[in-house]
Amino acid sequence: MNLAEGVQFVSLVILGGLMIFSALGVVLLSNIVYSAFLLALTFISVSGLYILLNAGFVAAAQVLVYVGAVNVLILFGIMLVNKVEVFSEVKNAWVGKAATGAVCAGLFGLIGTMVTSHPWAISTAPAAGDKAIEVIGQHFFSDFLLPFELASILLLVALVGAIVLARREFLPDLVAPQQEALTLPERPRELVAAGVRDED
Amino acid sequence: MFVLSGYEYFLGFLIISSLVPVVALGASKLLRPASAGPASRTTYESGCEPIGGAWIQFNIRYYMFALVFVIFDVETVFLYPWAVAFHKLGLLGFVEALIFIAILVVGLVYAWRKGALEWS
């Protein structure tokens, strides 16, 4: 193992450990804001793995879109809902837990089967390297043109749908209550002289 | 084979940006007077006293702005490879990118007309 491989291995271990522990923190921490910030750390670790794989554009897109935009959206979503102080006991909670466990075990089995059955042969095609972005661009406008154009329609649908949902246009006025103006509670204060006090 | 070749500047930026908070906090620790009065325990020293908790319900407009930002952020990521490979794509690529942008401009016009971009 030479120096370059050592650097790569150490970076892989650090990034992988960071990713696993931050992902565990997302699930296990009870404070949802900490979970959101740890999710950002997970995304950043994934982006570091992309850099290790020499996929600079994907790493930059990961940071730009997931950390910069999606995670901010998640944080705003958390800020939009009211903080729940007490959680009441859910009846028959084991049903939901069993269903979640079954789905997660099935997903784990599926991915595990795929990992073991995939040949993982290294492609003999020359690595794109610095030209990767150019190659991606050429694919976008030749054989991946239809998905590229469909992506714009998907973004348009997402934008229009989000605006309609946020403006609550689909609800009649009876159902959507008029939101009261937000006011901060005022605390009565004693009047204090602001000038210099006499010393006598 | 050094797989991370070409990322020397990235490493430099990473080191400098991680040093910034350390240097800023360390310098203020060295420079500031050691005695702490009761005023320095407040949230904003010599500022307004905050009222209520920090975790309040935010206005939905913040969410709208973040959402519109996500959409156009993704659009930027899609357009970047087009800009890099522009000289190889020719006129057809230009027209295709114009179609892509035109579809999203419809969304921008919709957001504008519906007032999603206004604070008021």
Image: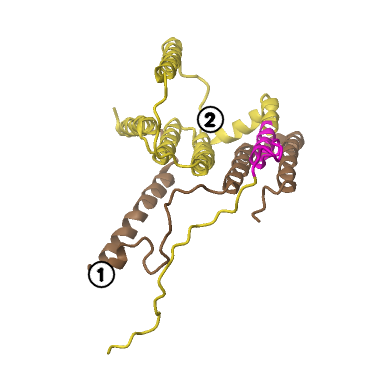
Chain colours: A yellow, B brown
Estimate the spatial distance between the alpha carbons at disc 2 and disc 1, rounded to whole Å. 56 Å
Q: Are marks 2 and 1 in contact (CB under 8 Å)?
A: no
Q: Position of residue A92 (x, y in %)?
A: 42, 18
B57, above or below A27, in the image: below
Residues A132 and A39: in front is A39
Q: Residue at x 41, y 74 (%)?
A: A191
Residue A55: percent from left, percent from top:
49, 32
Identify the residue at horizontal 65%, vertical 46% (top origin).
A178
* Disc 1 residue type (three-letter): Pro
Q: Quadrant of the N terminus of chain B?
A: top left
Q: Which image quadrant is residue B3 in?
A: top left
Q: Secondary structure at mark 2?
A: loop
Position of the C terminus of chain B by quadrant: bottom right
Q: Is residue A37 above or below residue A135?
A: below
> Is A189 on the left or on the right of B66, as rendered?
left
Disc 1 sits on a residue from what chain?
Answer: B
Indicate whether A87 appears above or below A177. above
Hey, which quadrant is residue A14 in on the image?
top left
Amino acid type at image mark 2: Ala
Q: Position of residue B17 (x, y in %)?
A: 39, 51
Instruction: Tell me which segment is drawn in magenta.
Output: A154-177
The disc label shown at residue B112, or none: none
**Residue A40 location, x and y as percent?**
44, 39
Q: Residues within 10 Å of mark 2 (few under 14, many from 20)?
A: few
Residue at 30% x, 31% y: name it. A6
- Give the chain of mark 2: A
- Residue for badge 2: A128
Is residue A142 at all visible to an observer of this figure? no
Q: Is residue A167 magenta?
A: yes
Q: Which mark is residue B33?
A: 1
Label 1: which secondary element: loop
